[in-house]
Amino acid sequence: MTQTAGAIGEVAPITQGPRVAADQTGRSTPRVHLLGFVLAGLFALSAFGDGLYARSAWLPVALATLAALGAVVLLAPGPLGAPALGAAGALGFLAAWSALSAGWADAPDSAWLEANRWLLYGAALAVLSASLRTPAGRRTAVAIVAAGATLLALYVEFRLLAGTASGMFFGYRLNEPLGYVNGEATILLLGFWPLTVFATHRDRPDAAGALAVGGAGLLLGLAVLTQSRSGLVAFAASALVCLAFAPRRLRLLGALLAAGAGVAAASPALLAVYHGFRPDVIGHPAAGVLREAGLAAAGGALVAAAAWFAGATAYRRLSAGNPVIVRRIVVLAITGIVVCGAVAVAPSAGSRADRAYDDFRSLSFDKGGTDRFTQGGGGRHDLWRIAAGQARDHPVRGVGAGNYTSTYFRERRQPSDVRQAHSLEMQVLGELGIPGALAVLGFAACVFAGAARARRRVGMDGAVAVAALGMFTAWFAQTSVDWIHNLPGVTGMALVAAAVLVAPQRGDASPGRRRPGQAALAAVALAAIALAGVSVARQYLSDHYRDQARSELRSSPQRALDDVRRSMDLGAAPIADYYIAAAAYARLGSYADAGAALRDAAAREPANPVPPLLLGDLEMRRESGARALAAYRRAQRLSPLDAALPPRITAARELAETSR
């Protein structure tokens, strides 16, 4: 999960305000900078820790980030400015609204979990925005993220060449070390933009620029191995936005074409990996095929580097005499290539688009097909349909944060067991209603407004702004059609990019003596941070006791019961506590108490099909076929497509008939 810096800046320099800060006020903020760098480094390396997806990973990070935010408030580095305050405020609103939604959510513990995740994101953005006030700070933060993504790519490439990468693939798609194919593609794209933009910032072709484009080509080539269609959407969206934003558009387009040439050269071997996939056969790609893919990815990187260096050198020499004419010729040539390509694909593009749209609506998808990138089918139409229905039925409040499944299992038209709508906007609209959706759009609007202001930056700082815009756009586009926002590590990398765009200019930072009103605001902020810390700590402790209880079930059911009660005493007990309690009671032979725990779970989350299913299993152990049949039928009403229920219902019916 990483990236570098670099970009563009052929704009007239703007006058910077007077330098106020450490040297004038005597109050230096290097510790604030360090907080931002440490946070950026943690997110950048999170690919090797499952993207901080596990609650046991991100809840401690949330506590540490809130503590860092408290330190920022105490150090008072200066005002954040409108874009940063607006973006962090939008995330804070999402946290508060999610917490409030626990009052009407079917699963209140899920609402609290989502609230704490939004607290992490809001606090991280605030800390990063306060830290990255200087060009050097912004450059370093983006470089840290770029380095993390590059490290991931080099690790994958090493495993490919060593012939030990078979276990890194899921369904013949690159999945590890992150553990989610689309998330892996996102990290590689986040690293792609700093490397690409860095090359365009070089005044003349050199080895550093060629190496950067080669690295970008490697990351893009490895992203092909994920077969991520949402990654393709993210790449296209970020490329269009960066080309519209960058002052040196022609250079950026040249770098993109060079990286694309490298990927095109490597694509036969890269695509051949997925071509071996058969949905009815469990297995992994052969080591030889993966080694060839690794060699092709490395060769493609060399092609990209050579193409960039040769093209940039030729352009520089030809334009030495008459740059305007040469530039126009190059623009016409590129335009001609684009037009010819469009004409070549136009005859089949319409029919392909129609077929893809039909597949999208019908949920049709050929899992054994070799052309995954051009397929439009899958389950997203169904997922978004359900989220839209939730928003229609509850336009203001939604169904509650984290409660997408409250209607999903009952209304789904395909059997996928998912927990979110695979779209940030659709999920928030269904779970938090119009206020939540407006907060998400407001967050994005503040970041893009910050990007518009950052466009005035010159030199390397301007290049960093272009790179950050590409990074954030890639993340936002991908999470708009997926659930990348639920991966705190990957989202944290995007928040680094967002902070680079919304962070106040150095001249905005004036950390002088606080006025009485400002001191009161700081006190309120510290109180809010402390309250947020209590929420996160409570959930962390609850998870700790639950994990401990789960590990004690076999050896000591009574100790497991004691620990799960400690978890419940912390409030908003997750329904998993009731499952563990029921299992412990059953091991102790107290089936009545086990059944009571499961009935309590069913009453707590009436739309959840799992409690009645487990209750049916318990009744089967007690050889009560009639009660088991009733429980299974209730579970089936809540989840009609659950393949595990029909055989259970049959067994319960037979037991009931035998017992008559």
Image (cartoon, rainbow, N blue to C red):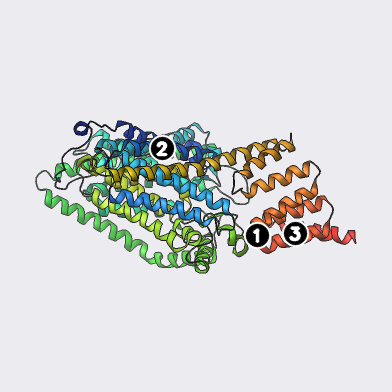
Quadrant including the C terminus: bottom right
Q: Which residue type carries mark 3?
A: Ala
The residue beneath circle 3 is 631
Q: Which residue type carries mark 1?
A: Pro
Residue drawn at x 32%, y 59% is 341
For mark 1, give the secondary structure. Answer: loop
Q: Nearer the viewer, residue 531 or 642?
A: 531
Q: Nearer the viewer, residue 423 or 194?
A: 423
Quadrant including the N terminus: top left
Q: Nearer the viewer, residue 418 or 371?
A: 418
Percent x, y of residue 195: 31, 40
Mark closer to the observer (3, 1): 1
How far apart are the two marked residues, 3 and 1, measured between alpha carbons? 13 Å
How many residues crowd mark 1 within 10 Å: few (<14), some (14–19), many (20+)?
Answer: some
Percent x, y of residue 613: 72, 55
Q: Which mark is residue 606?
A: 1
Mark closer to the observer (1, 2): 1
Eyeballing the image, is 378 above or below 540?
below
Q: Is residue 280 left or right of residue 98?
A: right
Q: Which residue type carries mark 2?
A: Ala
For mark 3, give the secondary structure. Answer: helix
Q: Which mark is residue 44?
A: 2
